[in-house]
Image (cartoon, helix red, strand yellow):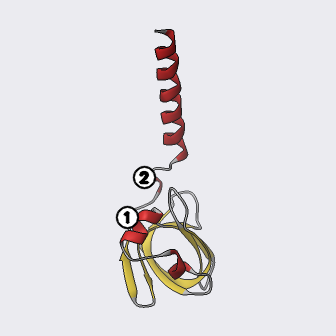
Amino acid sequence: MKRALVSAALSAALLATSALAHHGWSEYDADKPLTLSGTIAESGYLQPHGFVRLKTADKTWLVVLAPPGRMENRGLPKARLAAGGNATVVGYPHRSKPDELRAERITIQDKTTELR
C-alpha cells in the first residue's frame, strides 16, 4: 500500500512538472495577428515546438512553430527551415515578450504550411 502511494505521488509530481514546463497559448494575443517576412537566422526542430529566429527589417523575432512531427506530417521538413532562407509567418505576438510570435502558418519558397 505504501509503495502504491509513493508511486501515485511521484506520478502526480511528474505530471505537474511537465505541465508547468509547457507554456499556454493564452500568453499570445490572438486579437493582434501579425504577418512578418524576413530571413531565417537560426532554426530548431525540437520538442515540444520547433522555432525559427526570423530577422525582419526592424528586429529579430523568436517564432514558435508546431511540434516537429506535425511539421513533418504537413510537409515542412527540417531542411526547409535552413538558415539564410526567406520566410513569411502569420501569427500572434507574445503578451509580455516583444520579440516572440506564435506562428499559425509559415510560407517558405511559395509553400504555405498550416501549423495549428
Point out which mark residue 10 bears.
none
User: Can you tell which quarter of the image residue 109 is in?
Assistant: bottom left
User: Which of 106/31 is in front?
Assistant: 106
**9 lies above or below 58:** above
Secondary element at tag 1: loop
Label 1 CA crowd tier, 10 Å (few <14, some 14–19, many 20+): few
Instruction: Give whichever of 35, 44 is nearer the camera.
Output: 44
Which numbered disc flags the more N-terminal residue, 1 or 2?
2
Cα separation between marks 1 and 2: 11 Å
Left or right, 10 with reference to 72: right
Q: Using residue 39 as the reference point, say whether residue 109 is left or right of it.
A: left
Residue that badge 1 annotates: 31
Secondary element type, mark 2? helix
Query: In front here: 9 or 35?
Result: 9
Give x and y (percent) for residue 77: 47, 76
For the image, the number of numbered tags is 2
Q: Residue at x 39, y 86 (%)?
A: 111
Residue 31: horizontal and vertical position, in percent? 37, 64
Amino acid bearing label 2: Ser
Badge 2, how many Cα within 10 Å: few under 14, some, many 20+? few
Q: Position of residue 1 (x, y in %)?
A: 46, 9
Q: Is disc 1 in contact with disc 2, using a CB cutoff of under 8 Å?
A: no
**Residue name at image x 46 percent, y 22 percent:** 8
Q: Name the amino acid, label 1.
A: Asp
Q: Residue at x 48, y 67 (%)?
A: 65
Give the vertical position of 13 relative to 1 (above or below): below
Q: Nearer the viewer, mark 1 or mark 2?
A: 2
Name the residue tied to disc 2. Answer: 26
Q: Is residue 19 above or below residue 87?
A: above
Q: Quadrant of the C terminus?
A: bottom left
Q: Residue furthest top?
A: 1
Relative image position of residue 30 (x, y in whole percent): 38, 62
